[in-house]
Amino acid sequence: MTIASAVPAPRGDEGSAVDRTFARPYVVSWNLTYRCNLACEHCYLDAGPAKVSLPAFADRSELSTEQCYRVVDEIAAFAPESVTILTGGEPLLRRDIVEIVRYGVAKGLWIVVGTNGVKITENLARILQAEGVRGLALSLDALDPERHDAFRRVRGAWENTVEGAKILSRVGLPFIVQTTVGAHNRSELGAIAAFAHDELGARVWNLYFLVPSGRGAFVSDLEPAEYDQVLGELAKIQRDWSSRMLVNAKCAPHFVRNLLQSDSAAPFPKSFAGGAGGCPAGTHYMGIRPNGDVTPCPYLPLFAGNLKESGLGELWNDSDLFQRIRRRTELGGRCGECELNTMCGGCRARAYGMTGDVMAEDPLCTHVPGTLQAAVDRLRPTAVEYGQPATITLSWEPEARERMQRIPAFVRGMVTRAVESWCEKNEVAVVTAEVLESIRARMPTPKVFGAGAAARTGSSSDSGDA
Ligand code: SF4
Ligand code: SF4
């Protein structure tokens, strides 16, 4: 099945048919600033005062408020249903952060803020909530304050972040907790997940794997075998929390391999096959640098162009970089031969950071291609294929569009993609509420698509990286 199908009309133009060569991003991660009040040793953006001044991060200029408004206009016109993550550096250090949020919300964007949490006060949380921020993402790397502070390189950071999380819980602003795995916390991942849920009230816990980009290029990472062990542990943590907190791996697209090995009938591998998983760089996801440079993934220091000179849709659809990164059959080494290619694709930023070739195999994956062929064949009817031309023109009825708005932001793009894929496969040209209902009944996680449950569970996602 191709998913390069025609896409629903942008907001304000529902019901008319729009044909494009590739669908839109469902997560836009926008680094608003290089300024930061922490100095994390692994920072992929090389943000804050501890910079090592890499060439790809040399232009540290920021878009003005007016230029940011124009970027919001671009996102609202091209990818109105995407989640827009305002992050940094520390985005709360921008004096105009509330104005940018206000403008984005007025344009209909679903906005979340990725922050280290240090600057959250009750007053600021209430302002962000009143302005329409849907949620925040906070970073917590250890249960022991000293270890967290050493990793983030600022004394008192742990206390401030934990206090920030408690404020958000009190105020009722949803948040996720994100943890970067390494030697400093390798032995306590399950305990951190429990702390995030039980003590802080997080609805989502994401475990990040280091990508050798920015200052992260100079930090030692897990060995491939240890990486596998962590993914195995994560699969167990995910099962343990399955009905209470969403747990996922970030920057580790071959997590799908561990899931398939442990239970190929579980819903998560099915959703990977449906286009939810794998490396989303350039297929579901794009990044914007503080100066307006556009990249398929914030961790990947390769740029399609700059929004001061080009349109967002133009860069997404036509740039060589975005077109190339989607052609997974042209990946090198084991990733090119792999039966999990369409569900995984390997981390492109890690491949680039470790080899200099964005299409090389993911060096930290230990998979031997072919060994999971049988499990993949069972999922094949639902598997998507990236980088194919559009085969139909699709339109959405307003009622169907309205119903999609009730789906939690962190899965809405994925569900949109699944709906469009299903319509293309079944030659359905108009998405109606009845079509959605019919698809809902077939989905591995139908509850997330329900009319009422979705609105009640609304939360945020910090990023779409796999
Ligand atoms: S070989 Fe590449 S595509 Fe296959 S599982 Fe590993 S990282 Fe993913
Ligand atoms: S898996 Fe893909 S989206 Fe995630 S960090 Fe790697 S390149 Fe970026």
Image: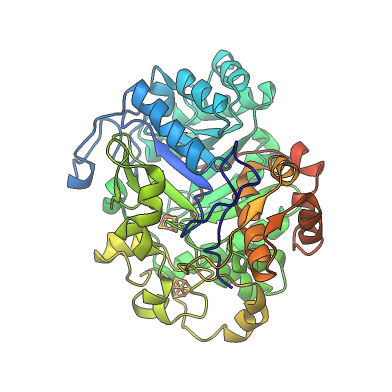
Q: Quadrant of the N terminus?
A: bottom right
Q: Where in the figure is residue 229, as x and y percent of width and height?
A: 52, 67
Question: Which residue is rendered at x = 58% and y = 31% of the image?
Answer: 108
Q: How many marks?
A: 0
Q: Is residue 139 visible?
A: no
| Along the line of sight, the residue nearer the viewer: 12 or 34 | 12
Question: Which residue is rendered at x = 54% and y = 16% of the image?
Answer: 124
The outermost residue toward the top is 123
| Along the line of sight, the residue nearer the viewer: 410 or 76 | 76
* Quadrant hosting residue 7: bottom right
Considering only vertical position in the picture, is 162 above or below 45?
A: above
Q: Is residue 357 left or right of residue 465?
A: left
* Quadrant hosting residue 327: bottom left
Q: Is residue 388 left or right of residue 38?
A: right
Q: Is residue 194 visible?
A: yes
Q: Where in the figure is residue 213, as x and y percent of width and height?
A: 30, 51
Q: How is the image coloured?
A: rainbow
Considering only vertical position in the picture, is 190 above or below 147?
A: below
Q: Is residue 86 left or right of residue 164?
A: left
Question: Which residue is rendered at x = 32% and y = 71% of the image?
Answer: 360
Q: Where in the figure is residue 202, as x and y percent of width and height?
A: 65, 38
Considering only vertical position in the picture, is 428 above or below 372?
A: above
Q: Where in the figure is residue 130, as x and y percent of width and height?
A: 62, 18
The outermost residue toward the front is 16
| Along the line of sight, the residue nearer the viewer: 306 or 134 | 306
